[in-house]
């Protein structure tokens, strides 16, 4: 266990060393943790409902610029700015972010009051705040580079004129400063470094990886997979078992990758017009859906392997009792139903005459079926 924690600490330290507290250019400096923070992180959607497109962040001259963007003056804004801020935060995604952390804590042995401990709740708060900040920064940059326009994205409050660029910049800067301050309060060194490393990794995603085919999807899935691992590390004295060290993060990675690819299918016309080379743009919606189906199938196989492995060990330890076998059956059923349904929906997208419409349905349903996959590890 200690060896695993040491390896995690070392890996996270490498991530943090890539660019400590340095983020996307253009948000303005906000002092935090001893350095100037400029920008916003992107924990990466946690796989739920966010539209991120592969775009470059610089204008022709090299530095970001507001020139040529549609005007969003303060005089043209409605009075209800608070509602616009909430819309940017995509608060409906926060329960899933919290669930990922809680699942990691539960699998690592946390129960009862341990799941309500202030330290675990602080880690969950950091994770949800990373999620919120990623939503805001995505809207900001998509508008700046012209990916989101009033015609292309009705959900971007900046493109709809409800907030100005300056207001969005100030909002995300304050959110990010608060996030870094909260990360500094996390007691466990490994968890703290992973949270910071995830933020730095998402900066690299936003700055360099979004234009690269598939790499952007893999980057988002990787960062999301850190959430259950951080939750497991947040439980004091918990054993870092194979389920929380390998199985749960791996399934989270595959589940988010599956969803990420599907989410690019409805965006294919806009991405193609913007020169963004997503999988649907390069290979077509049907092949992208087939790839998503293969990823979900791999997740189903991994769930079966991990649940069987854990269940058999528990069954032997308990002397082969009915209760142990029953728990194994329930875990297997939940995991296979959830992952199998996700694979089936992706295959339906491949077969559909209107892949974009079917992809929307698959994306919405995955928000309900993916929690079943998490149950396989409890």
Image: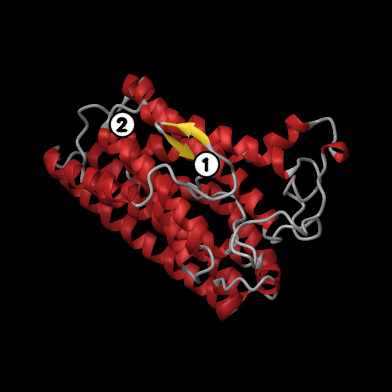
Q: Position of residue 153 (x, y in %)?
A: 74, 56
Query: Dot 1, how many residues are within 10 Å of its Cα: few (below 14), some (14-19), or many (20+)?
Result: many
Query: Dot 2, how many residues are within 10 Å of its Cα: few (below 14), some (14-19), or many (20+)?
Result: many
Residue under label 2, please give it: 234
Q: Is residue 5 above or below residue 273?
A: above
Residue drawn at (72%, 57%), measured in percent from left and top?
148
Q: Secondary structure at mark 2?
A: loop
On the picture, is 368 further left or further right than 114? right
Image quarter in which the N terminus is found? top left
Residue under label 1, please give it: 131
- Check the image and name the residue furthest to the bottom: 283
Image quarter in which the C terminus is found? top left
Q: Position of residue 314 (x, y in %)?
A: 18, 42
Q: Is residue 71 above or below residue 195?
A: below
Q: Position of residue 5 (x, y in %)?
A: 19, 41
- Check the image and name the residue furthest to the front: 61
The foreground one among 214 and 30 is 30
Q: Is residue 192 above or below residue 68?
A: above
On the picture, is 88 further left or further right than 296? right
Q: Secondary structure at mark 1?
A: helix
- Quarter of the image for residue 183 reads top left
Q: Are marks 1 and 2 in contact (CB under 8 Å)?
A: no
- Check the image and name the residue furthest to the right: 76
Residue drawn at (63%, 53%), measured in percent from left and top?
141
Mark 1 vs mark 2, CA separation in Å: 18 Å
Residue drawn at (54%, 78%), measured in percent from left and top?
287
Q: Which mark is residue 93?
A: none
Residue 52 is at least partly visible in this image? yes
The foreground one among 292 and 202 is 202
């Amino acid at each position: 266990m200690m060896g695993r924690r040491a390896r995690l600490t070392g890996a996270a330290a490498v991530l943090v060393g890539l660019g400590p507290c340095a983020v996307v250019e253009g948000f303005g400096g906000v002092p935090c943790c001893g350095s100037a923070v400029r920008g916003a992180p992107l924990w990466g959607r946690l796989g739920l409902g966010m539209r991120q497109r592969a775009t470059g962040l610089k204008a022709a001259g090299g530095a970001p610029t507001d020139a040529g963007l549609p005007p969003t003056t303060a005089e043209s804004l409605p009075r209800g700015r608070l509602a616009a801020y909430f819309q940017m935060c995509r608060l409906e995604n926060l329960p899933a972010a919290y669930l990922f952390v809680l699942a990691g804590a539960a699998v690592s042995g946390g129960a009862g009051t341990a799941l309500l401990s202030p330290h675990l709740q602080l880690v969950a708060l950091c994770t949800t705040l990373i999620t919120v900040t990623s939503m805001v920064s995505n809207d900001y940059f998509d508008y700046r580079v012209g990916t989101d326009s009033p015609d292309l994205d009705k959900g971007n409050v900046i493109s709809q004129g409800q907030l100005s660029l300056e207001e969005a910049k100030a909002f995300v800067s304050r959110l990010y400063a608060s996030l870094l301050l909260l990360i500094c309060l996390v007691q466990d060194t490994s968890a703290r470094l992973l949270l910071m490393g995830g933020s730095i990794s998402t900066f690299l995603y936003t700055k360099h990886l979004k234009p690269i085919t598939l790499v952007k999807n893999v980057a988002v899935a990787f960062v999301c997979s850190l959430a259950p691992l951080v939750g497991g590390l947040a439980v004091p004295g918990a054993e870092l078992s194979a389920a929380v060290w390998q199985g749960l993060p791996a399934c989270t990675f595959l589940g988010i990758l599956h969803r990420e690819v599907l989410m690019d299918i409805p965006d294919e016309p806009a991405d193609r017009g913007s020169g963004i080379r997503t999988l649907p743009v390069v290979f077509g919606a049907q092949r992208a859906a087939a790839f998503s189906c293969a990823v979900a199938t791999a997740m189903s196989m991994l769930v079966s392997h991990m649940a069987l492995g854990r269940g058999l060990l528990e069954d032997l330890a308990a002397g082969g009792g009915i209760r142990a076998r029953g728990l194994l059956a329930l875990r297997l059923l939940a995991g296979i139903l959830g992952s199998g349904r996700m694979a089936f929906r992706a295959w339906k997208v491949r077969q559909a005459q209107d892949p974009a419409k079917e992809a929307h349905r698959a994306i919405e349903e995955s928000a309900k079926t993916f929690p079943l996959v998490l149950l396989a590890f409890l």
